[in-house]
Amino acid sequence: MTAVLQGGSTRLMPDGPALRLPHKLVLVAVATSPFQKALTLDAGFPLKISEVLVVVAGGALLLQLRSRPKVPAHLRPQAGWLGALGALVALAALVNLVTATPPPPYPGYGRSLTTDLLLYVGYAAMVFVVWRTMLDISSRLILDAMAWAVRLAVLFCLLQWYLYETAQESLIRALGFEMVIGQAYGTLMPRNGPFYEGNNLGVFAVLAALMMLRRRDGWGVAGAVFCVGYSQSTSALLTVFAALAIAALLVASPRWRFRVVVTGLLALAVVVAVPSARQYVQFQAEKVGLSAGSGTTDSGDRTDLSRSLRSAKNGVGIDMTLAHPVAGVGPGRFGAWFGEYADPADFPPGYTTGGPHRDSRRIVENGYVQVAAEVGLVGLFCLVMFLFGLARATARVGFVELALTVAIMLLLVTAAAWTLLALWFALGYQAAVTREYGDGLVPAPRATAEAPT
């Protein structure tokens, strides 16, 4: 690949348009995306390196509007759905700035409701900046940045485990680690690495594993799979196999289907042969209700507590949506309205009224329900249409790209927020690779072993 000068900036041929300041900033944001809690600044919320870089990239993007490449014709429907979602987020914010709010308290809200709403509008703006900026970047460069991110994630997972085992609390605080402890392997150990929680690490790891598979980076794939196991995330584990299986059934060549089957058999052999792997699978099966087991952890918590909580909160979100179908309750305000719709009988004692959970912000943990409850049903429709358009586009590109799209769609079901940057970095990669396919910069799938069958 040759770098040539064009218009005063470096253009990487044939992979993409001119690589300018916003592109460079977003690439560094991708590489530093694992630092969701570790190495963050306390600004009333964890201020992340990647967020700062994306905000600066957004400002630089505004200054370069006239010289920015246009969205290719085959991606304009997706851009349209995303633009409509952005407009609806802004509308929901305006409507809910002037309408009544429920009476306090608002557990987990350290700012005024107005400030918080504007902050969550900013989160939405950031993901739109990410998608639009990454659209113009070479997909190869994005994969290279993600390779750095995987290695940093593995390094900080190992560092977290070491600091936990050696009880170095001062270093844990100094580096900003959040210690989330799990026992899926039969012993207490941390499970979130540099992320805020284990589920977020799992989301990142699943997407990274598929992107490293596309890069043909064996160490990258191994590192991402390690992070999936370290996260102890049930949704991450299920998503990996479901995404590969669905993509294999829909578009894969016989060679890819053979690889998927062999991978599944190898995983089964590991579960049968390794006691800790059997313990891990048993624990995850108990969490989703596929196995009775003991029903409790060593600390006395129900193993299916996470599933029952998510189900109850989804019900709250649906009730909230039906009561506010047009403009929702406003970006970030699910927790503020939670007490108005939650039935205490559906939750652990004290969850809706205080107790040990009094300082925790209530989140729905489902990106689709979050959009419906906070932005409205039309906003949910725009998000779903955007994702289905992406699925159709990536099915033409190849097996790995479709598997990545399926993984994104599945991970949103249990995501802490629909604006989680890890999801949108993957969506940005998908935008870049579909642009390259439409421009004829990647081979047509029927000319490769990844042709739809």
Image (cartoon, grey):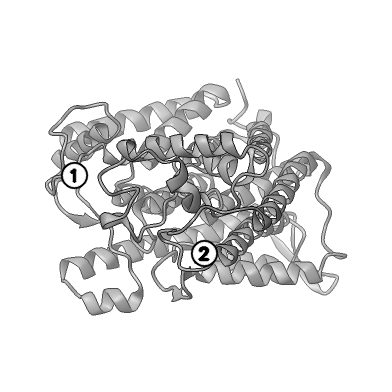
Task: Please state which amino acid type lies under the numbered disc 2.
Answer: Ala
Residue farthest to the right? Answer: 66
Is 255 placed above or below 412 here? Answer: above
Query: In this rendering, does residue 20 appear at all?
Result: no
Quadrant location, the N terminus: bottom right
- C-alpha span from label 1 to label 2: 36 Å
Question: Where does label 2 land, which residue?
Answer: 31
Identify the disc placed on residue 136.
none
Quadrant location, the C terminus: top right
Q: Are marks 1 and 2 in contact (CB under 8 Å)?
A: no
Residue 113 % position (x, y)? 55, 62
Residue 241 % position (x, y)? 40, 33
Q: Residue at x 45, y 68 (%)?
A: 110
Given residues 229 and 408, the one toward you in this image is 408
Task: Please state which amino acid type lies under the numbered disc 1.
Answer: Asp
Is 449 placed above or below 124 here? Answer: above
Query: In this rendering, does residue 58 appear at all?
Result: yes
Question: Where does label 1 land, which residue?
Answer: 301
Residue 143 % position (x, y)? 56, 55
Mark 2, Cα crowd under 10 Å, few <14 / some 14-19 / many 20+, is: many
Instruction: Describe residue 265's horizontal placement relative to residue 3 as left or right.
Output: left
Instruction: Describe residue 383's horizontal placement relative to residue 252 as left or right.
Output: right
Instruction: Give the secondary structure at mark 2.
Output: helix
Instruction: Describe residue 343's horizontal placement relative to residue 216 as left or right.
Output: left
Instruction: Give the secondary structure at mark 1.
Output: loop
Indicate which label's residue lies in the foreground, 1 or 2: 1
Q: Residue at x 39, y 42 (%)?
A: 236
Q: Residue at x 47, y 52 (%)?
A: 335
Given residues 210 and 96, the one toward you in this image is 96
